[in-house]
Amino acid sequence: MKKLALTAMAVAFVSATALAAPQGFNQSAVPGGPQGFNNQAPNTVSGVLSDAHDDQVVTLQGRLTNFLGDDRYEFTDAAGDRIEVELDDDKNWSNISKDQLINIVGKVDKDLLSTTIEVKQAAPVQQ
């Protein structure tokens, strides 16, 4: 009886550690699990202007094309659509420059008459 109990405990221990072996994070979506962890395609400026809601986080790809004063810039995407973006002057934005292709991640600020993006991150596109 003791041999049977010891054998059962050994099998349980070995199988438990085998099942708990690290598998890594699976990038594919699991049914019933959280979605959207794959690389998100950038939004378009026209899509943000027409469909985005206030405080929505968006990703855009394009270029800073004009300085509007203070911490405000004009951002233009590949389709030529433009939107005002705000680059907080408390951050170091020296890694990006005018007319350079960049990806920005920011929060939509939708007011009664205007829509702007408060940029949280910006990085040059690796080509």
Image (cartoon, rainbow, N blue to C red):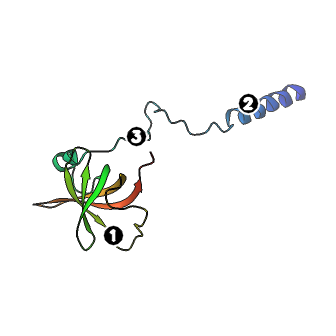
Q: Tell me the CA gap for discs 3 and 1.
A: 28 Å
Dot 3 lies on which element?
A: loop
Dot 2 lies on which element?
A: helix
Q: List x then y, in percent, for residue 125.
A: 41, 49
Q: Is residue 37 left or right of residue 100?
A: right
Q: Amino acid at mark 3?
A: Gly
Disc 3 to disc 2: CB gap under 8 Å: no
Is 68 or 22 nearer to us in this picture? 68
Residue drawn 21% across the image and 44% down it: 47
Q: Tell me the CA gap for discs 3 and 2.
A: 33 Å
Mark linked to residue 36: 3
**Does residue 121 appear in the picture of this structure?**
yes
Q: List x then y, in percent, for residue 27.
A: 51, 36
Q: Amino acid at mark 1?
A: Asp
**Residue identifier under label 2:** 15
Disc 1 to disc 2: CB gap under 8 Å: no
Q: Tell me the CA gap for discs 1 and 2.
A: 54 Å
Mark linked to residue 88: 1
Q: List x then y, in percent, for residue 113.
A: 10, 60
Which of the two marks, 1 or 2, is nearer to us in this view? 1
| 2 versus 83 height, above or below | above
Q: Amino acid at mark 2?
A: Ser
Nearer the N terminus, badge 3 or badge 2? 2
Residue drawn 30% across the image and 50% down it: 62
Nearer the N terminus, badge 3 or badge 1? 3
Q: On the image, which quarter does residue 42 sit in?
A: top left
